[in-house]
Image (spheres, rainbow, N blue to C red):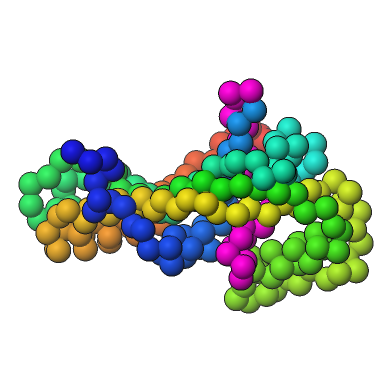
Amino acid sequence: MKYPPKHHQDNDINHMIEVIKTYPLATLISVKDNQPLITHLPLIYNNEGKLIGHIDKFNPQAELLKDDNDVTIIFSGPQCYISPSIYSTTQLPTWNYIIVHLKATVKAIENKTSLIASLIDMTAFLEAPEHKYVLKPDNRSMKGYLDYIKMFEITITDWEGKFKLSQDKKPRDIENARAELIRANQESIEQFLGKVFLSQDEFNK
């Protein structure tokens, strides 16, 4: 049996780009001396089909984000446990998720003008559609941090979309699983944040 099952794979690059744009916080993985270095940071997909990112120069992974070094990137979309109770047919428990895996090469961009432009562009993208905040080129706070930020550009060499959404079930059950994914993600965020803030309030007493 081929793994992963074909019906859980989505090779449509446009679908994967949509995941990247909607959930831009990436898991960026490099390897040094057979040990993984992992950083979580937003990456923005630009018009040239590249990913642009920024990293603190003191982050140990920063020294690997250059010279066409290899990186692995993971973008995570919505995910949740699927109970058999939501199906109209007999099924077993499972977990549904949307994940994009990328293999790529990375190079450093050592140019402050490009760095400033990319910080402005990233902020504009993340502020869309309301754009309540606009990062301007003469922002003093930004200029004070430029010496501590490393910019890098990622060229994607391999795409893999993992869209496990109960596609092997009957149409009604597929729709039930979709509805459960939406419901569970909304509910889990509210419950989790409630627990976290409650714990903080108790700690501060």
Q: Is residue 117 left or right of residue 189?
A: right
Depth order, front residue of 195/148: 148
Depth order, front residue of 122/83: 122
Q: Which residues are magenta?
A: 33-53
Question: Which picture quadrant has residue 139?
Answer: bottom right
For the image shown, how many numbered marks are present on the structure?
0
Which quadrant of the figure contains the N terminus?
Answer: top left
Question: Which picture quadrant has residue 196?
Answer: top right
Depth order, front residue of 69/27: 69
Residue 165 location in percent, x, y?
A: 27, 54
Relative to 66, is 14 above or below? below
Residue 20 location in percent, x, y?
A: 51, 59
Q: Residue furthest bottom?
A: 130
Depth order, front residue of 184/172: 172
Relative to 182, is 202 above or below? above
Which quadrant of the figure contains the C terminus?
Answer: top right
Relative to 93, is 9 above or below? below
Main SS, magenta residues: strand
The question of residue 97 being in magenta is answered with no
Q: Residue at x 76, y 72 (%)?
A: 134
Q: Residue at x 10, y 55 (%)?
A: 88
Relative to 47, is 25 above or below? above
> Can residue 142 be seen in this snapshot?
no
